[in-house]
Amino acid sequence: MVKIAIVLGSTRPGRIGQAVAQWVYDFAAKRTDAQFELVDIADYSLPLLDEPVPPSMGQYNNEHTKRWAARIAEFDGYVFVTPEYNHSTSGALKNALDYLYAEWNNKAAGFVGYGSAGGTRAVEQLRLIMAELQVATVRTQVALSLFTDFENFSAFQPAAHHEQPLTTMLDQLAAWSQAMKLVRGRDHMDMYRS
C-alpha cells in the first residue's frame, strides 16, 4: 500500500490551513488504497535554506535538514495543502521544498489550494516546482474560496461540492503514487546495470 503525506504548507500564526489539512486527512483516512499521514512543515522549524551544498548533492549538514529529509523520504506521494499569497504558494512551503531533492524524485503529488481565487495560482506555481523536483502531478485539484468556504474568512466550512474533486484527486494520486513506486524501482535497478 502506498503512503501519502498531507503536507500543511503554511506556518503563519492563526493559519486556516490546519482546518483544511485536517479535512483532507479525515476524508482520505476512510480510503483503503493508501495510508495517509499529516505532515506539518511548522513542526520542522526550517530556517531559510541554510545548507552550504545544493540539495541535489544529497550532502546534508544540519540536523533539521536530516530530520526533514528522513520524514519526506518515507512517502510515495503528497497532497500539498497550500495557501495563496501574492499569486503564489507560501514562502515557508517553497523553502521546505527547496531543502531536498532526491527525497522528492519520482513520486506523485496532488493539491488542495485555498485563497481568494481558490489557491489556483499557488497550485500553478507548485506544478512548476514539482516538475523540477521530478514529481508527477495529477490533474485534478481542489480549489477552496475564502469567500464561500470560510465563514468570516476564517472558520472553514467547505461546500459539499468539493468532495467530488477531492475524491478524484485522491484516486489519481493513489494510482500515480503506486505507478511511481515502479519507476523508482526501475531507476534503482538501472543504477546496478551501468
Image (tube, rainbow, N blue to C red):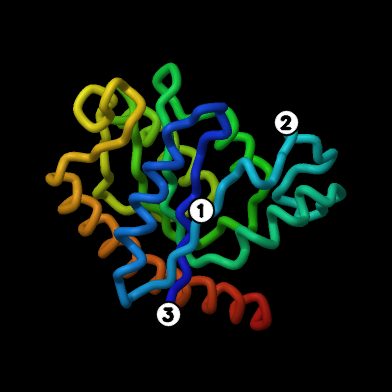
Residues packed near mark 2 inside 10 Å, few (<14), some (14 to 19) or many (20 plus): few
Q: Which residue is found at the position 51% from the left and 28% from the top?
A: 14
Quarter of image, res 109:
bottom left
Q: Is residue 18 found left or right of 54 in the rendered image? A: left
Q: Earlier in the sequence, mark 3 or mark 1?
A: 3
Q: Which residue is mark 2?
A: 48
Q: Which residue is mark 3?
A: 1
Q: Earlier in the sequence, mark 1 or mark 2?
A: 2
SS at mark 1 in the image: loop
Q: Is residue 126 found left or right of 162 in the rendered image? A: right
- Is 134 above or below relative to 125? below
Q: Which residue is found at the position 44% from the left and 65% from the top?
A: 36
- Is 30 above or below relative to 135? below
- Is 131 above or below relative to 1? above
Residues packed near mark 1 inside 10 Å, few (<14), some (14 to 19) or many (20 plus): some
Amino acid on which disc 3 is placed = Met
Looking at the picture, tell me which residue is in the foreground, 179 or 24: 24
Q: Which residue is mark 1?
A: 134
SS at mark 2 in the image: loop
Percent of width and height locating residue 110: 36, 51
Q: Which residue is found at the position 42% from the left and 31% from the top?
A: 83
Residues packed near mark 3 inside 10 Å, few (<14), some (14 to 19) or many (20 plus): few
Asked if marks 3 and 2 touch (Cβ < 8 Å), the reply is no
SS at mark 3 in the image: loop
In the rendered image, the quadrant that contains the C terminus is bottom right
Per the model, the C-alpha gap separating discs 3 and 1 is: 22 Å
Percent of width and height locating residue 91: 57, 28
